[in-house]
Amino acid sequence: MKKLFPVLFVSAFSFLTAFSQEKKVPYGNNPANGKFYEIRGVKMYAETYGSGAPLLIIHGNGGSIKDFSNQIPYFAKKYKVILADGRSHGKTKDAGDSLTYEMMTDDLAALLSAMGVDSANVIGWSDGGINGLLLAIRHPEKVKKLAITGANLWPDSTAVVPGVVNMVQSMYAQIIPEKNKNEANKVGFKLVRLMVEQPHISLEQLKTIQAPTLVIGGDHDVILEEHTMQIYKALPKAYLWILPNSGHATPMVYKDEFNAVVGRFLKEPYKTYTIEQRFY
């Protein structure tokens, strides 16, 4: 027993040290893994982790690379995880006065090309889900499989909870007079305006997506469950996963389940159900 105790102690210490180091990785501000790329007129900041098949993970409005601190360690064990601060987000500065989902999507396609990545699996959260859908529409050759959570196709109350629409519109009205006050206000104006006026993706466009897609939402998401169902129904090859007792932050609140289910989706071949298989 005396001999065993030091071994157990050293093993436990090693585990805790590794765990602590993993937690302290400065995702989103990591010089060891980060780099700027000249992409379509901006210096786009991106980080990569792990090795294997490429996996692009896309953040939401006002977010950044660090939003996926719960996903990076998990997926980096099997994939080359690619994350970027989108245009006008995080370290990717943009002096322009306009911003569209299409612009950000084309940026991501160009980033993959700059990295020598022909195609990748894609995970997108919120606006990242919108960009994931647009990437599969505008650059279908870049997307192998797609997992999206909390995405919407249009900005009105038929897609987004009415109270949220009103809140965002109120924010927009308040920030308009202050939009040129300083750089932070200019960026804030672009990001809020994006949510108020966009996106505009049709169900017909979704029908062109051939990449197998996992559509995710919370049953109390800011995106209406009916709208998430519309997305799922329009996609030719799709699975649906609605998380119970969940809002918009599914990758955070349900991080372990989210990682496991998305990981299994990326790993396993897409299955088309026959009439007989529907009984099982």
Image (cartoon, rainbow, N blue to C red):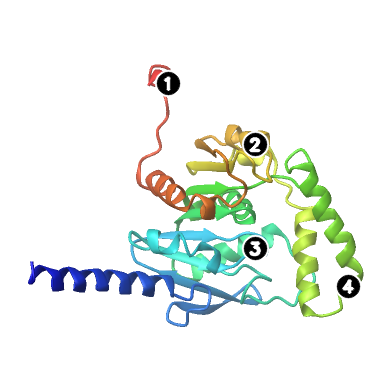
| Secondary structure category for the residue under label 2 | helix
Q: Which residue is disc 4 drawn over?
A: 178
**Nearer-N-terminus badge (3/1):** 3
Residue type pointed to by label 2: Glu
Q: Which residue is disc 2 drawn over?
A: 225
In the depicted view, which residue is nearer to us: 252 or 265? 252
3D distance between C-alphas at marks 3 and 1? 39 Å
Q: Position of residue 155 (x, y in %)?
A: 76, 47
Horizontal side of 16 relative to 169 (left or right) equals left
Give neighbour class at mark 4: few <14, some 14-19, many 20+ (Cα, 10 Å): few
**Nearer-N-terminus badge (2/1):** 2
Residue type pointed to by label 1: Arg
Q: Which residue is disc 3 drawn over?
A: 104
Q: Quadrant of residue 80?
A: bottom left
3D distance between C-alphas at marks 1 and 4? 56 Å
Q: Which residue is disc 1 drawn over?
A: 278
Q: Which circle, 2 or 1, is nearer the viewer?
A: 2
3D distance between C-alphas at marks 3 and 2? 26 Å
Q: Position of residue 23 (x, y in %)?
A: 42, 70
**Nearer-N-terminus badge (1/4):** 4
3D distance between C-alphas at marks 2 and 1? 23 Å
Q: Position of residue 135 (x, y in %)?
A: 58, 54
